[in-house]
Image (cartoon, grey):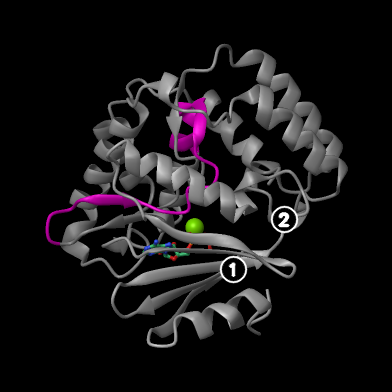
Amino acid sequence: MSDVPDTAEKTLRRRYPDHEWTPLAARTAHVHRLHGDPALVVKTAPRPAGPDPGLDLATEAATCAWLADQGVRCPTPVDTGTLDDHQYLVMTAAPGIPLDGDLPADLREPAVDAVARATARLHRLPVTACGFDRRLRVTIPMAQESAGLGEVDLDDLDPPRRGWDVTRLTTELLTQARLIGREEVAVCHGDLTPGNVLIDPDDLTVAFVDTARLGLADRYSDLALFTRDLTGTPGFGPAAADRFLHHYGEAPVDPQRLEFYRLLDEFR
Ligand SMILES: Nc1ncnc2c1ncn2[C@@H]1O[C@H](COP(=O)(O)OP(=O)(O)O)[C@@H](O)[C@H]1O
Ligand SMILES: [Mg+2]
C-alpha cells in the first residue's frame, strides 16, 4: 500500500489540525495515532471490492460499538464514512501496548495469561445478543467467492499448504468442513492476533482492536489464529501458545479443528 495520503486522510488531517499524526500501520488500511486531546486513531482504506467485512470500516465501527456495549474494553468509534473512493474510521485510542509490540520481557507471560482470560470472557458473552454472523454458513461461501475472484494469496500460504493451488485449497476446505462436526458457537473476535490485543502494562487489562470480523463463530477460529501467530512472534513461540490454551481453559486441544480454521484463514 502506498504511503501517499488518500483523499479521506487529507480531509481528516484538516479536521484534526491540532493533533500530531504518527503512522502505525499501512498493510490493508492506513492507520495513524493522533496524539492530542482526546487521543485518537484514524484508519483509512479504499472501499472494499470483495465480500470480506474485515476490510469494511463501517463494520469495524459497528462491531466495536457493540462490543463496548457488552462491557469489553475496545475503542469507541467517533466518526465513520466515505470520502470519494475511500472509507475512514475515527476512534478513541485504546490504552495499552500491542502484544507484539515493545512490552517489557517480564510482562510477556502474564500478558499471555491475561489475553487468554479476556478471550475466554469474550467467548462467554451471550450469543443471542450478537447480530454479527461469522458461522461457516457465511464464511465458507465467502471463501469460495474470494477463491473465484482470485483473491487468495498463494504466495503467502502457511507451511503445511505451501505450493497448493486454489482448487486443492477449496477441495480440502469443503472436505474438512464435513469432518469437523458441529461449530461451538461463541462471540469471536474474528482476527485474534497478537497485534490486535493491547495490554495495559500497569494492570494487564486487555483491549481488543481491529474488530471488523467479530461475530458468532466457532471459538476455535480465534484459538487457531492466535496460537499460530503467537508461535511466530519474537519473544513468544510455541510454549507461549500452549500457555495461552492452558489459561484459556482448553484441554484437551483439538488439533484438527485448529488446522481447519487456519486453512479457512488462507482465503482472506
Ligand atoms: N483504537 C486503537 N487504539 C490503539 N491502538 C490501535 C487502535 N487501532 C489500531 N491500533 C494499533 O494499530 C495497529 C494497526 O491497526 P489495525 O486496526 O490492527 O489494522 P491492520 O491490522 O489492518 O493493519 C494495531 O495492531 C494496533 O497496535
Ligand atoms: Mg490488526
Q: Nearer the viewer, residue 166 or 222?
A: 222
Does 54 lie within the magenta span?
no
Circle 2 residue: 48
- Mark 1, residue position: 44
Q: Is residue 10 above or below residue 85?
A: below
The amino acid type of the residue labelled 2 equals Pro
Residues rendered magenta in the picture? 202-224
User: How many residues crowd around disc 1 within 10 Å: few (fewer than 14), some, or many (20 or more)?
Assistant: many
Judge whether 159 appears above or below 31 on screen.
Answer: above
Q: Residue 189's spot in the image, x, y percent?
A: 45, 40
Residue shown at 55% from the left, 42% from the top: 213
Position of residue 62 in the picture relative to residue 178 (left or right): left
Residue, far front: 15
Give the quadrant of the N terminus. Answer: bottom right
For mark 1, give the secondary structure: strand
Residue at position x 44%, y 87% in the image: 17
In the displayed structure image, the side of residue 3 where residue 234 appears, left or right: left
Residue type at mark 1: give it: Thr
Seen in the picture, residue 69 relative to 22 is either above or below; the reply is above
Q: CA distance from mark 2 to mark 1?
A: 11 Å
